[in-house]
């Protein structure tokens, strides 16, 4: 069916979307650590993090963590370090290491990328958690810390998550963390000689307060028993806040 025409007496600016009279471009993310209870998310440094990360990734004997990434796996620490120095030290993407507060070891990475201060949009990506980090409190807290910087500290409007549409684990993680599915961009890229359809997710500034309350309730010490098992899931808490 054709679009319904606007009433003739409707002012033209009503068709242009919500006005943002106080909007100003946002700052770029700083190279400064984000401190949590279980983890610290800090700018990636080959001298500090290469050895830990290579060791953490090497525990994945089948190299499954590299399946959907456009790089890796790496045969030895030297090759891994060379990639880090060539790829991970710029401002966009801005790579961070996820460090265990208990022992100071880096167990995974995540980055800000496609940083667009003019319109307040930023993406999280290059997420690669070693097996010891996966499905832990640290894994979730790291994502919360990165979100809090984007929305609370920097005042961005939109936070994006994109992944291979076949990556069921990443898609489930996005939904658990509160992102909204927006659709699939078909044949969006060629990765390792194969087609990639890209699934898009987003979290908006107006959605952040509710998501933040759920994260804080889930991360609270009283949500875990003496063995560190969660009393309530993040999904259950989100349904309550």
Image (cartoon, helix red, strand yellow):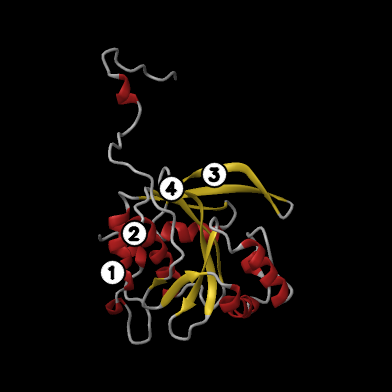
- Between label 4 and label 1, give the one nearer the viewer: 4
**Mark earlier in primary sequence (4, 1):** 4
**Residue underneath mark 3:** 184
Q: Secondary structure at mark 2?
A: helix
Look at mark 4 in the image and give the residue it sits on. Answer: 117
Percent x, y for residue 4? 37, 18
In front of the other: 2 or 128:
128
Residue at 57%, 76% (x, y): give it.
49
- Disc with the residue nearer the chain's start (3 vs 4): 4
Mark 1 surroundings: few (<14), some (14-19) or many (≥20) residues within 10 A: some
| Residue 69 rendering spot, x and y as whole percentages | 63, 60
Between marks 3 and 1, how big is the CA–CA gap?
32 Å
For the point 43% across and 74% down, which residue is it?
40
Q: Nearer the viewer, residue 231 or 146?
A: 146
- For mark 2, what is the residue? 153
Q: Earlier in the sequence, mark 3 or mark 1?
A: 3
> Marks 3/4: CA distance?
25 Å
In the rendered image of this protein, does residue 44 appear above or below residue 25? Answer: below
Mark 3 crowdedness (10 Å alpha carbons): few <14, some 14-19, many ≥20: some
Q: Which residue is disc 1 drawn over?
A: 217
Q: Is residue 32 left or right of residue 208?
A: right
Contact (Cβ within 8 Å) of mark 4 with mark 2: no
In this image, 75 relative to 117: left or right? right
Q: Residue furthest top?
A: 8
Instruction: Left or right? Give the position of 53 relative to 72.
Output: left
């Amino acid at each position: 069916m054709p679009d319904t025409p606007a009433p003739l007496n409707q002012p033209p600016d009503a068709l242009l979307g919500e006005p943002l009279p106080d909007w100003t471009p946002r700052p770029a993310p700083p190279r400064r650590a984000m401190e949590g209870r279980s983890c610290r998310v800090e700018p990636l440094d080959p001298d500090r993090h290469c050895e830990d990360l290579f060791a953490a990734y090497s525990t994945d004997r089948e190299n499954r963590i590299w399946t959907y990434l456009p790089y890796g796996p790496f045969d030895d620490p030297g090759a891994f370090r060379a990639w880090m120095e060539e790829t991970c030290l710029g401002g966009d993407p801005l790579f961070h290491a996820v460090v265990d507060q208990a022992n100071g070891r880096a167990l995974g990475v995540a980055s800000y990328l496609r940083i667009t201060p003019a319109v307040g949009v930023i993406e999280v990506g290059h997420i690669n958690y070693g097996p010891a980090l996966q499905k832990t409190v640290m894994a979730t807290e790291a994502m919360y810390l990165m979100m809090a910087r984007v929305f609370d500290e920097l005042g961005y409007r939109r936070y994006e998550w994109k992944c291979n549409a076949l990556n069921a684990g990443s898609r489930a993680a996005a939904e658990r963390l509160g992102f909204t599915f927006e659709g699939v961009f078909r044949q969006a890229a060629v990765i390792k000689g194969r087609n990639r359809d890209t699934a898009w997710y987003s979290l908006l500034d107006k959605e952040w307060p509710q998501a933040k309350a759920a994260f804080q309730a889930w991360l609270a010490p009283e949500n875990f028993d003496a063995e560190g098992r969660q009393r309530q899931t993040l999904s259950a808490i989100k349904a309550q806040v």
